[in-house]
Image (cartoon, rainbow, N blue to C red):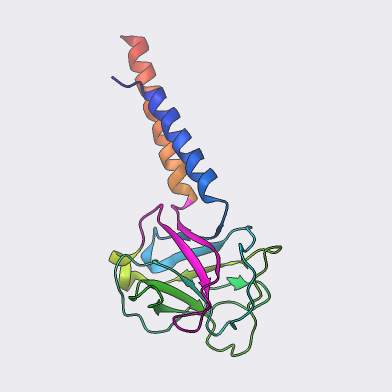
Amino acid sequence: MFPVWKAFVCVLAAMAAFCATSSAATVLLVDVTDPSAVKITATTANAQASDSDFPQMVGVDLLHFFTSAVNMSVMYTRDSTLTPTGGGAYLNFESDNYSGSLVDLNLLDGGSLTAPQNFNTTARAFTGEAYLNLSSFASFLPAIGSYGNIITGVNTETNGTVIGQWQAVPEPQTWALLVGGALGLYFLRRRVSSQG
């Protein structure tokens, strides 16, 4: 039988490896725990490429975000402080077909015809966070651990510059519950073995 403490150590090692390998170019974290309030949060990572070719009105695409094609018109969110470097908040989102089908998520500000997006390798790619109601597309949301590239622009209005990656992560409380549960099992197992 595999000791519980070894399982716990393996889980911690896997979590450390996951964090170490995914933090280099990850500029947006996506919490899909609640489809009615999908939270997209900026990390402190710099953009991995410089680009200022496209205004905020075309925004950025999170490539291969949806697991299957979704036909989503432009939607609006008031709960957004997610901003690109040198721009205002992304207030709109829609599906996009840059990847060949409607599996990409486009974040944009359709009201900002000329507002700039100035991504630079010496500055954070984004700041803030956004909450999107994607409950109508819950079965198409990415699984935890999924990731993909983020490009500037949308569909045909892009040069394909990859400025970083997005990654689907569980909310912090989920990690706390997993670690707490593993510790509980460890101490329960230890108590049972010391009594027997």
Q: Where residue 185 appears, x then y in whole percent?
A: 36, 28
Picture layout, residue 103 above or below residue 192: below
Question: Most extreme residue toward the right, as rendered?
Answer: 122
Q: Which image quarter: residue 180?
A: top left
* 71 horizontally vs 43: left or right: left
Q: Which image quarter: residue 87?
A: bottom right
Which one is in front, 103 or 29?
A: 103
Image mark count: 0
Q: Where residue 106 appears, x then y in whole percent?
A: 46, 76
> Which residue shows up at 32% across the image and 22% down it?
2
Question: Most extreme residue toward the front, as rendered?
Answer: 159
Which one is in front, 7 or 164?
A: 164
Q: Which residues are magenta?
A: 142-171
* 158 horizontally vs 37: left or right: right
Which one is in front, 150 or 93?
A: 150
Q: Is residue 160 magenta?
A: yes
Q: Where residue 193 appears, x then y in whole percent?
A: 34, 13
* 100 horizontally vs 114: left or right: left
Q: Quadrant of the C terminus?
A: top left
Q: Is residue 159 magenta?
A: yes
> Which residue shows up at 43% across the image and 68% down it?
63
Picture layout, residue 7 above or below residue 124: above
Q: Quadrant of the N terminus?
A: top left
> Which residue shows up at 51% across the image and 73% down it?
160
> Which residue shows up at 54% across the image and 44% down it?
20
